[in-house]
Image: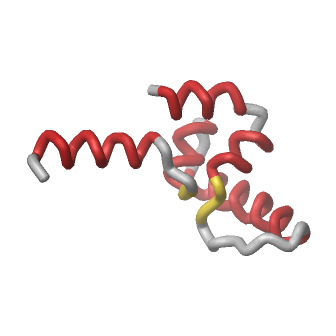
Amino acid sequence: MSGRTAQRTKERSESMKQYLNAVDVAGIMECSVNHAYKVIRGLNDELKAQGYITRSGRIPAKYFYERAGLGDLQEAHNES
């Protein structure tokens, strides 16, 4: 794979992340990473209560955008 192709693949995979980490959430919410971890923990608790499997320190991007009321932002982000 050429350098240019690898870069495009990396950019595409970053823009279509299935899971967001605390740094991603902090950037989107314009808050501290510490607060982002609290948000993720709370959302993961909601998912666990619904019977879903969760990953500590990560949140499914689709669920985060839905709960944050940013569904339109996610669609715009994935299209670019």
In the image, what residue occupies the spot 86% across and 73% down? 51
Q: Is residue 34 left or right of residue 14?
A: right
Is 29 above or below relative to 2?
above
Q: Residue furthest left?
A: 2
Given the current orientation, which residue lies at the most extreme front position? 1
**Which residue is most to the right?**
49
Q: What is the quadrant of residue 30 in the picture?
A: top right
How many discs mark residues in the rendered view? 0
Place of residue 57 in the rendered image (x, y in percent of width and height, measured from the top left): 60, 67
**Percent position of residue 48, x then y:** 83, 71
The C terminus sits in image quarter: top left
Q: Position of residue 44 (x, y in %)?
A: 76, 65
At horizontal 66% and vertical 53% (from top left) the residue drawn is: 35
Q: Is residue 22 left or right of residue 80?
A: right
Q: How is the image coloured?
A: secondary structure
For residue 48, side relative to residue 11 (left or right): right
Q: Nearer the viewer, residue 1 or 58?
A: 1
39 up-or-down from 14: above or below: below
Could you tell me residue 68's position as x and y percent? 75, 39
Q: Residue at x 56, y 54 (%)?
A: 18
Give the residue at x 79% y 70%: 52
